[in-house]
Amino acid sequence: MKKHVSYNGEIMSMNAFGCKVTGWKAIQTYAMMKKVNDKKTLSELREEKMKELGMIK
């Protein structure tokens, strides 16, 4: 997964980018971001994988 983005000529982390464009002090990238061509958030994909691995029920 990409860890940095270029925004207005500035390289920054995904988290910094999210804060900058929303104006928020903090964001939950896993709750908001989606993979390209996927309808599930990263949080949903993470939860599915953790269930698959028996890490959670």
Image (cartoon, rainbow, N blue to C red):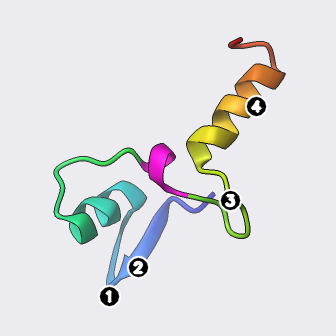
Q: Which residue is mark 2?
A: 6
Q: Which residue is mark 4?
A: 49
Alpha carbon of mark 2 to alpha carbon of mark 4: how far?
29 Å
**Mark 3 and mark 1 in contact (Cβ < 8 Å)?**
no
Rendering coords of residue 24 (x, y %): 18, 55
Q: Which residue is mark 3?
A: 39
* First in sequence: mark 2 vs mark 4: 2
Q: Residue at x 69, y 41 (%)?
A: 45
Identify the element where label 3 is drawn: loop
* First in sequence: mark 2 vs mark 3: 2
Alpha carbon of mark 1 to alpha carbon of mark 4: how far?
35 Å
Residue kind at label 4, given as amino acid type: Lys
User: Main SS type for the magenta part?
Assistant: helix
Alpha carbon of mark 4 to alpha carbon of mark 3: how far?
16 Å
Q: Residue at x 57, y 40 (%)?
A: 43
* Circle number at residue 31: none
Q: For label 2, count other residues whose C-alpha is less than 10 Å away and answer few (under 14), some (14-19) or many (20+).
A: few
The correct choice, above or below, for 33 with respect to 37 in the image is above
Is residue 19 rendered to the left or right of residue 54?
left
Is residue 3 rendered to the left or right of residue 38?
left
Q: For label 4, count other residues whose C-alpha is less than 10 Å away and answer few (under 14), some (14-19) or many (20+).
A: few
Identify the element where label 2 is drawn: strand
* Circle number at residue 9: 1
Residue kind at label 3, given as amino acid type: Lys
Residue with the most extreme front position: 39
Mark 2 or mark 3: which is in front?
A: 3
* First in sequence: mark 1 vs mark 4: 1
Alpha carbon of mark 2 to alpha carbon of mark 1: how far?
6 Å
